[in-house]
Image (spheres, rainbow, N blue to C red):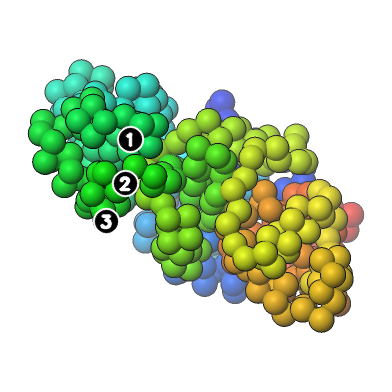
Amino acid sequence: MIERTQPPDLAPSARRDEAAEERPLPTPDEMYAAVLARDTRYDGIFFTAVKTTGIFCRPSCPARKPARENVMFCRTAAEALELGFRPCKKCRPLELPGETPEPVRRLLAEVEEDPTRRLNDDDLRARGHDPVALRRWFKKHHGMTFHAYQCSRRLAWALGELSRGARITEAGFGSGYESLSAFQDAVRQVTGRSAARSRGAVVVQISRVATPLGPMLLGATEEGVCLLEFTDRPMLETQLRRLAKLLDCVLLPGTNEHAARLEEELREYFAGRLREFTTPLVTHGSDFQRRVWNALREIPFAETRSYMEQARLIGSPGAVRAVARANGDNRIAIVIPCHRVIGADGSLTGYGGGLWRKKWLLHHEGVRGAWEGRRTDPAQTELGLGSVDGSS
Ligand SMILES: [Zn+2]
């Protein structure tokens, strides 16, 4: 029995989105395989509605998987709601994947306001948090407990003070360490060197941003944003290690003005209101890589180029493969729009964040190509929802 629900005050992911309504979906086989694998890369790309329970989920939902014949695939949460399905309580498909709940957001803001203050479990309870649930949430989304998160923020603050010329004693005691040796140990553990030698270390603040295509990892130094990647990207760990080495930097959780600015710009981009990013970027790489990345930034919104054209543009027409490789090494997805480069024959070729994200982004920007396939999507026909363009 399907219970009819009145869509309440809808989360962004559930709002009616006309571009989304004609977005091509993967084939039903691919989607069902993604559901079985709980593949987070498909979060935001489609939703599964289960006819027998009347509930709809994200592909990565941890709940028991429904039989294939009971599953309908929807493009948006709004579509599932309109069909009368209720949002699953486990995977919460109305929230953006990876989104930080409001009470946690307030808590993070409090930590940012004064990273040197320590909030203990009693402080957390006084603010209405269950310390155990909070620990679980932080483990899942930041890979550490809330207390470890606070420690990292404190350390980042202290390293910032050091690089601004503070004495080690000032930075250590100012950031709330009980003893100088405890501070020295903490610094050495994170930076691999003594506090004195950490003075010049670049701190990259790492935070998570929720997007309709899944959570992204955002990294920013005091000069600008140096990292934006989907968190399920297979090579992410390697990328982070390479970045730490390249910038000779320390990666610590946290955020700063550049990160906040890009987060706002991303919100506008995904809402269809922003075409050009203006957040300062920090791109470290070889001369060749930087030429390729600069050329990428020249590709206007809603346009595509081939690798060959890109190679010609940077004056190395013979270096098509190297251009493709440098594209793949781009660490600032979406902002440096490597998704706008496609094969000379109009095929999509690869994308580090997954081909479906590339399709999604191009479609979102209004690019329509041969890779979108037939207008009548087999997934829709099978579900009896009619053709994609609604004309037949
Ligand atoms: Zn679910």
Q: Which mark is residue 198?
A: 2
Q: Residue 145: x and y, percent?
A: 24, 43
Mark 3–mark 1 contact, CB under 8 Å?
no
Quarter occupied by residue 385? bottom right
Q: Is residue 380 left or right of residue 148?
A: right
**Mark 2: secondary structure:** helix
Observer-nearest of 15 and 301: 301
Q: Is residue 121 left or right of residue 337?
A: left
Q: Is residue 258 above or below residue 45?
A: above
Q: Nearer the viewer, mark 3 or mark 2?
A: 2
Q: Residue 231: x and y, percent?
A: 47, 56
Identify the mark nearer the N-term, 3 or 1.
1
Q: Nearer the viewer, mark 3 or mark 1?
A: 1
Residue 5 in sight here? no
Quarter occupied by residue 324? bottom right
**Could you give the CA–CA distance between mark 3 and mark 2, rounded to whole angstroms?**
9 Å
Neighbours of disc 2 within 10 Å: few (<14), some (14-19), many (20+) = many
Q: Amino acid at mark 3?
A: Gly
Q: Residue 313: x and y, percent?
A: 86, 65
Q: Which residue is mark 3?
A: 192
Q: Which residue is mark 1?
A: 162
At a point 36% along the width and 31% down the height, the residue shown is 165
Q: Is residue 129 above or below residue 378?
A: above
**Mark 1: secondary structure:** helix
